Amino acid sequence: MSSGNTTKSTRRGALLGMAGLAASSATVNMAFGAEKGPFAIKKASLLQRKPGITHEEFAKHWVEIHAPMAIGIPGIGRYTLTIINKTSPRKNMPTYDGLQVDGIAEQWFRSQADYETYLSSPKTARLRDDGATFIGRQIDFLCEEKVIIAT
């Protein structure tokens, strides 16, 4: 999708569906180092690209350079990327003004100890340094996942 096709309206609608997207492994396009659960901790992050970077440039860097850097970081049990291609705001609910989400990152950890190992790893610091080169805004959510439908 070219950045010219992304409107404020479609960007604002992204958060409306985020809860479902973040909670559903069915929306995952790619999994790195995927392990089978159970997982005690899930982190979902909404990502917005840096100004001056197109959505395509953001996605290419995220998939080809950034995500592979996560392989081998201690503590991560699963890491997925969801690249936003289109949003569909609900007509019967207000939208979020000015919200732009280019992707949703999800990470799962088997325990608090695994999460703390991840946080303190030098490899995590390198991952964050790279993220600063193409991610303009990020908000993280520590989540409790409830699987409703698993196929």
Image (cartoon, rainbow, N blue to C red):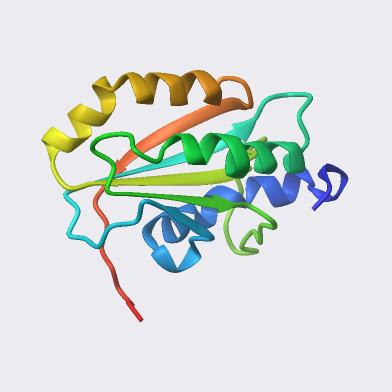
Relative to 57, say whether 22 is above or below: below
Which residue is most to the front?
72
115 or 21: nearer the eye?
115
Q: Is residue 49 left or right of residue 1?
A: left
Split into 4 quadrants, where in the image is the C terminus? bottom left
- Percent across and percent down for residue 86 are 69, 58
> Closer to the camera, 42 or 90?
42
Q: Residue at x 61, y 42 (%)?
A: 64
Residue positioned most to the right: 4
Measuring from the top left, give residue 68's x and y in whole percent: 49, 40
Circle count: 0
Residue at x 76%, y 29% (from the top left corner):
53
Q: For this view, does 139 lie left or right of residue 150? A: right
When the figure is inspected, residue 93 is found, relative to residue 116, above or below; the finding is below
Q: List x then y, in percent, for residue 78.
A: 33, 51
The percent coordinates of residue 120 (x first, y second) are 25, 20
Occupied quadrant, residue 90: bottom right
Q: Residue at x 45, y 31 (%)?
A: 139
Which residue is at 69% across, 56% downward?
85
Which of the 4 image quarters holds residue 22? bottom left
- Residue 101 in sight: no
Residue at the far bottom: name it.
Answer: 151
Whether residue 21 is visible here, answered yes or no, is: yes
Q: As rendered, which of 70 and 92 lies closer to the eye? A: 70
